[in-house]
Image (cartoon, rainbow, N blue to C red):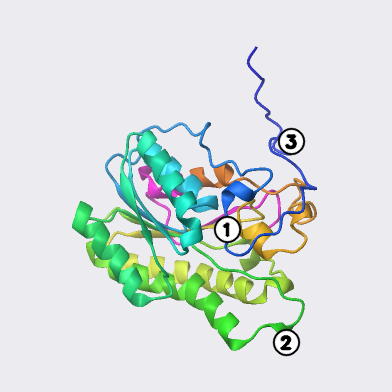
Amino acid sequence: MKKKKEENPIKKYPQPPFPKQPQDAPGVTSSMEPVPDHGERTYVGRQLLQDKVCIITGGDSGIGKAVAIAMAREGAKVIISYKEKIEDEDAKDTLDWVQKAGSEGFVIRGDIRSENHCMKIVERTLAKYNKIDILINNAAYQMTYDNLDEIDTTEWNKTFDTNIRAMFYLVKYAKPHMKPGSSVINTTSVNAYDPNPSLLPYAATKGAIQNFTASLAQMFMEDKSGIRVNAVAPGPIWTPLIPSTIPDHENFGKDNSPMGRPGQPAEIAPIYVFLASEAASYISGATIPATGGRVTI
């Protein structure tokens, strides 16, 4: 007998407490319990993005992985950017799901803090597909701190270089090759509205990303390029970043989400598909919150 689908969003996915499971950053999916849901078994495509070419930073795991699977099932070709060798397995698995969807793409490992590497991502994409339709700036770095003295200059710069400066590089090099109707989607956070003091550098970058999104959207309408720019602001989402950067991850999402649980990557991916599709043709400069009920006004 087929199990009835859970319709109550509070009960749809596992609720904390979860097992204690510390990892070294950036973390890997296979060591997580429960294993995140990226929509592998559930996302149904409708060919909304047929033959589009999509770059996703941080596409190996978490939200990026779920977005890659969704984009592929919508007919897009997917470029999966990620940083560390330890993430090779996750990146390969994501590409496997892209190919199972009947689509194609490739993985590219490297540090997006490097302007040259960001240029390389764009150049490799153009060499293979001769265009870029969707740029998803999703990769991020965070770390938890108890006080200001724990944050040195190197750590502060690493967070800003990864989370906001890389977005500038990628947009700068991709834009000349993006036609009217193309889309840039940036991942910000509920921390842009309600910053967590223990995530000071991360929260500051997420506020900057929201401002960058709004400014860029206006610039691209004023220059008549016809490229839409939007952002998604997730709340607490269960990804490898959590057990590798948050000490009390076993209770993650319990108290900072009215639903009492973290969101799953599969619950966030459809928002990116919507923003990239023709259904969002009149939306630019917007941020869509997906926070499990946390208020963002």
Identify the residue at the far top of this view. Answer: 1
Q: Residues within 10 Å of mark 1 (few under 14, many from 20)?
A: many
What SS does tag 2 mark?
A: helix
Res 74 visible? no
The image shows residue 208 at horizontal and vertical percentages of 53, 74
Q: Which residue is mark 1?
A: 233
Q: Earlier in the sequence, mark 2 or mark 3?
A: 3
Residue at 56% x, 73% y is: 205
Q: Mark 3: which secondary structure? A: loop
Q: Quadrant of residue 156?
A: bottom right
Instruction: Please tell me whether mark 2 or mark 3 is closer to you in this view.
Output: 2
Pick whichever, 180 or 139, lies toward us. 139
Q: CA distance from mark 3 to mark 1?
A: 22 Å
> Which segment is the magenta one?
272-297
**Residue 243, quarter of the rendered image:** bottom right
In the rendered image, which residue does mark 2 sit on?
149
Q: Amino acid at mark 2?
A: Asp
SS at circle 1:
strand
286 relative position to 195: left or right: left
The three-letter code of the residue at mark 3 reads Lys
Structural distance between the alpha carbons of marks 2 and 3: 40 Å
User: Where does label 3 land, which residue?
Assistant: 11
- Residue 282: say if magenta: yes
Other residues around mark 3 within 10 Å, as few (<14) / some (14–19) / many (≥20): few
